[in-house]
Amino acid sequence: MVQVCLNGARGATDGWMVPVSPGALADSAVEAVAAGATDVHLHPKSPCGQDTLSPRVLAVTLEAIRARVPVPIGVTTGAWAEPEPAARLEQVRSWTVLPDHASVNWHEPGAEEVATALLDRGVGVEAGIWSGTDGASRFAVSPLRTKVLRVLAEVTDPDSETAEASARALLSDLDSDHGRPVLLHGENGGAWPVLRLAGRLGLATRIGLEDTLFLPNGERALSNAQLVTAGLVQYGCP
């Protein structure tokens, strides 16, 4: 599986190609799926362009994309969108239109409660385990570890020279008894080395403007679709 991550915490200051509005996200998703992406991850944005967990914004965004693509759609629940754990949990519980899945960063305060609320509502959980955090050790003892949709192994090392080693270390830290699929990905300078590693290991991965603004040859990417096309080649798809 190659997931496309459409925007992340990036916005207009990162370039015109980063989709922010529901319409732009839908357009980008259509192009990325046509290029070969089989799953979509995105960060809904407020009118000011900030990440938000607002039920209204989420509903409008999901409806715009679902009207145009048939693949599963997931969103973030990152603490930066709502730093207060109780408020973050309340927003998730008040969603009126549900994503197919949502990422929950296991090192963040309130992660278990947010994941439980999502599962109770029938939303799949991507357990975000970031390198450089205690996410792996916390997930290893979580009663939810066998109930999540997949483990999102997120390599935060941005150095192209060391990211693969960081990825291998993260995978080694992950307890394998959860029995769930693993999606391995990197970011910035580490995005392409980690994606290639995922291909060699037969793991799911993702690529898109959230993870990198550049193609493997160093040129600026003009779209998520362009990154997906390059990603499939780097991953080893025929």
Image (cartoon, rainbow, N blue to C red):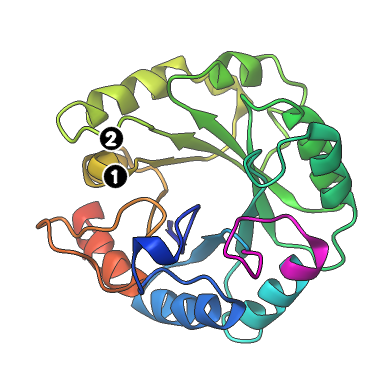
Residue 14, percent from left and from top = 36, 61
**Quadrant assignment, res 136:** top right
Mark closest to the chain's N terminus, 2 or 1: 2
The quadrant of the picture occupied by the C terminus is bottom left
Q: Nearer the viewer, residue 122 or 53?
A: 53
Q: Indicate left or right for 121 with 138 as reference.
A: right
Say which of 106 and 43 sits in front. 43
**Could you tell me which residue is drawn at 31 percent across and 53 percent down?**
212
Which residue is drawn at the image coordinates 15% and 55% (left, top)? 216
x and y, in percent, of residue 47 in the image:
65, 70
Q: Are marks 2 and 1 in contact (CB under 8 Å)?
A: yes
Please provide percent x and percent y for residue 144.
75, 29
Instruction: Identify which amino acid the numbered label 2 is placed on.
Output: Pro
Magenta segment range?
Answer: 45-57
- Look at 18% across and 36% down and name the residue there: 160
Query: Residue 148, labelled with which disc?
Result: none
- Compared with 12, 35 (above or below) is below
Residue 54 lies in magenta, yes or no? Answer: yes
The answer to whether residue 161 is left or right of residue 37 is: left
The residue at 9%/57% (across/down) is: 217
To which residue does mark 2 refer?
Answer: 158
Please say whether residue 177 is one of the residues in the magenta stretch. no
Query: For mark 1, what is the residue?
Result: 188
Helix, strand or loop status at disc 2: loop
**Which amino acid type corresponds to the residue marked 1 in the rendered image?**
Asn
Q: Count the marks: how many? A: 2
Mark 1: secondary structure? helix
Q: Which image quarter holds the N terminus?
A: bottom left
Quarter of the rendering containing residue 71: bottom right
**Closer to the camera in the image, 159 or 128:** 159
Measured from the top left, where is residue 91 in percent x and y? 84, 50
Residue 5 appears in the picture as rendered: yes
